[in-house]
Image: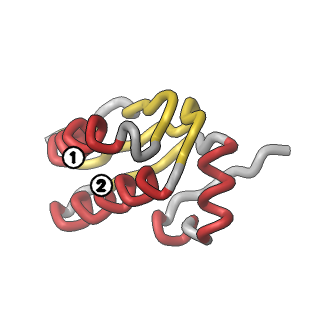
Amino acid sequence: MSTSSPLRIEGELTIYRAAELKDTLLAAVAANDTLEIDLSAVEEFDTAGVQLLMLAKRAATAAGHTLRLAGHSAPVLDVFELLDLSQHFGDPIVLPA
């Protein structure tokens, strides 16, 4: 097991890509003791994307691994604020100035 370089998600993190991203995300969680997901290039984010990140968090916790979210883009920040999710993931969210 290892710590990888950040997994960068680009474009949509929506229902239209959830199935495509699920296997990649879960494989990365399983393969790394610590996985950081870079969300800075996420342009669209919906509840399917939230569910996918929650699934990854549950999988990491069950395996005794660490999952970190970083670089929250504006769409991600909007949804996290709307749904009050920042504490669920336990990652610091830096709000833009």
Element marked by disc 2: helix
Q: Which mark is residue 39?
A: none
Tell me what residue is drawn at x 38 percent, y 59 percent: 51
Q: Are marks 1 and 2 in contact (CB under 8 Å)?
A: yes
Residue 79 relative to residue 10: left or right: right
Tell me what residue is drawn at x 16 percent, y 47 percent: 30
Tell me what residue is drawn at x 30 percent, y 38 percent: 21
Q: Quadrant of residue 37?
A: top left
Q: Which mark is residue 26?
A: 1
Q: For mark 2, what is the residue?
A: 56
Above or below for 66 versus 7: below
**Quadrant of the image containing the N terminus:** top left
Above or below for 41 versus 73: above
x, y (%) of residue 23?
20, 40
Q: For the residue marked with disc 2, what is the amino acid?
A: Ala
Taking depth in this image into account, of 13 and 29 the one nearest to the observer is 13
Taking the view exactly as shown, the residue that stands out farthest to the front is 16
N-term mark: 1 or 2 = 1
**Quadrant of the image containing the C terminus:** top right
x, y (%) of residue 83?
60, 69
